[in-house]
Image (spheres, rainbow, N blue to C red):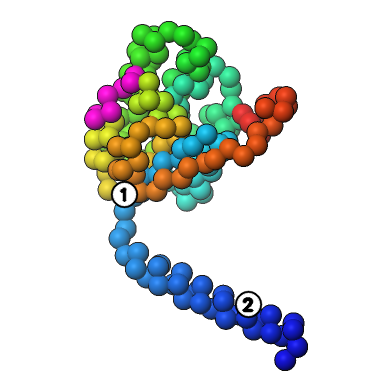
Amino acid sequence: MNNTDKRAAKHKKAMAKQKASVDAAVEAADRERGVAILLTGNGKGKSSSAFGMVMRALGYGFKVGVIQFIKGEQLSGEEIYLREHCPQVDFYQMGTGFTWDTQDRSGDIAAAKATWAKAKPMLENAEYHLVVLDELTYMLAYDYLPEDEILAALSGRPEAQSVVVTGRGGGSALREIMDTVSDVHEIKHAFKAGIKARAGVDY
């Protein structure tokens, strides 16, 4: 057996072992229910990942709810597309922009409460297969909304409903109740090199 054949045989053996491991994990996952996903960390891509799941759910014809906290002054590509082409998506934005723009704590709290009043009914409605709460973590970090109420709503949602929460931080209690937590780390960012945010990529 030459080196190429040996390498091929070694690869086949390794892949067979990996397949057996994956098959066993799939077999062991025997519970059918919605999942709670937290996308956090200081890296780019948390909201983009959440909207990828929105598109995935739409591909199966599911009903989706999207609530964006903080964002809203500048139109984004996902907002434009969903509003124009996806009537089965209920989309709501807090619309105040970033907190460092408003510099108005009482106004931000009022806006956060009004936005949460749109989000909470979605988390109680089994018709929604997926609910995205974009940038919700900041509402906890800045103490704009009561943590216990948010955690209870996330935990008490309909069994078949999945929810995605994005944003930096959010606290240990939020992480504890989520099924999947991904921490997106920043290694490099074009903006720090003086490159402007780009339509269709960054917003």
Residue 160: which numbered mark, if any?
1
Kindly identify the residue that appears in the image at 28 percent across and 28 percent down.
147
Kindly identify the residue that appears in the image at 48 percent across and 10 percent down.
102
Left or right of 175: which side holds 98?
right
Kindly identify the residue that appears in the image at 34 percent across and 68 percent down.
28
The tally of labels here is 2
Question: Could you tell me which secondary element the residue under label 2 belongs to?
Answer: helix
- Magenta stretch in the rendered image: 143-149
Task: Quadrant for residue 32, please give it.
Answer: bottom left
The magenta stretch spans residue 186 = no
Residue 11: which numbered mark, if any?
2
Left or right of 37: which side holds 80?
right
Task: Quadrant for residue 75, please give it.
Answer: top right
Say which quadrant the C terminus sits in. Answer: top right
Residue 111 image point, x, y percent: 38, 15
Q: Nearest the camera: 95 or 26?
A: 26
**Circle 2: is it few (<14), some (14-19), or many (20+) Cα within 10 Å?**
few
Q: Is residue 77 above or below residue 157?
A: above
Residue 170 image point, x, y percent: 38, 32
The magenta stretch spans residue 147 = yes
